[in-house]
Amino acid sequence: MIILITSLLLTLVSSYYTTYKSVTTFGEGYCGEASPCEVKVIAGGFPVQYLYDTIGVSVEGVLSFEDTLKENLFLVDFSFYFILLSLLAYILFYVKIE
C-alpha cells in the first residue's frame, strides 16, 4: 500500500518537470489564416509528459488543474514509479547481500 501511495505522489510531483511540446490547434488567435497549426505549449511529467497547458482556457505557461490531463500517459508515469519502487523494495528487503 505504501508503494502505491508513494508512486501516486511521485507521479504528481513529476508534473513540476516541464518541457515544451508542439500541439495542433485551430483558431485565428494562434494560427491566423493557416488553421490548423502547430503551437508550442508547456507540458509536465517525467518520464512521459502527461499534463499539457490548455490553449485559450488556462493561464498560458503555467500548469494547473484546468489543463489537459492525458490519462493513458499518466498511467505510464504511475507504472514507471510503481515498478521502480517495487524493485527498490525487493532489493532492500529480500535480497541478501553476502
Image: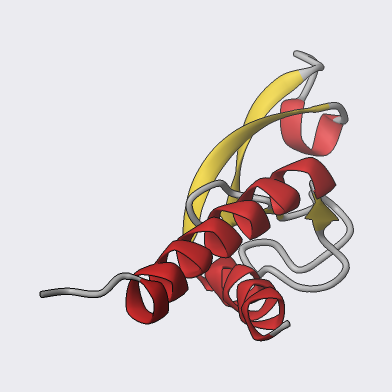
Residue at 61 percent of width and 63 percent of height: 61
2 or 51: nearer the eye? 2
The quarter of the displayed image where residue 10 is located: bottom right
How many numbered marks appear? 0
Relative placement, left or right, of 79 versus 1 is: left
Q: How is the image coloured?
A: secondary structure
Residue at 71 percent of width and 20 percent of height: 37
- Reply above or below: 32 against 40: above
Relative placement, left or right, of 98 versus 1 is: left
Percent of width and height locating residue 82: 59, 63
Residue at 73 percent of width and 82 percent of height: 1
7 or 24: nearer the eye? 7
46 or 25: nearer the eye? 46
Percent of width and height locating residue 45: 57, 58
71 or 61: nearer the eye? 71
- Reply above or below: 7 against 1: above
Percent of width and height locating residue 83: 54, 57
Classify the position of the C terminus by image quarter: bottom left
The quarter of the displayed image where residue 73 is located: top right
The quarter of the displayed image where residue 6 is located: bottom right
The residue at the far bottom in this view is 2
Residue at 50 percent of width and 47 percent of height: 20
Q: Is residue 17 visible?
A: no
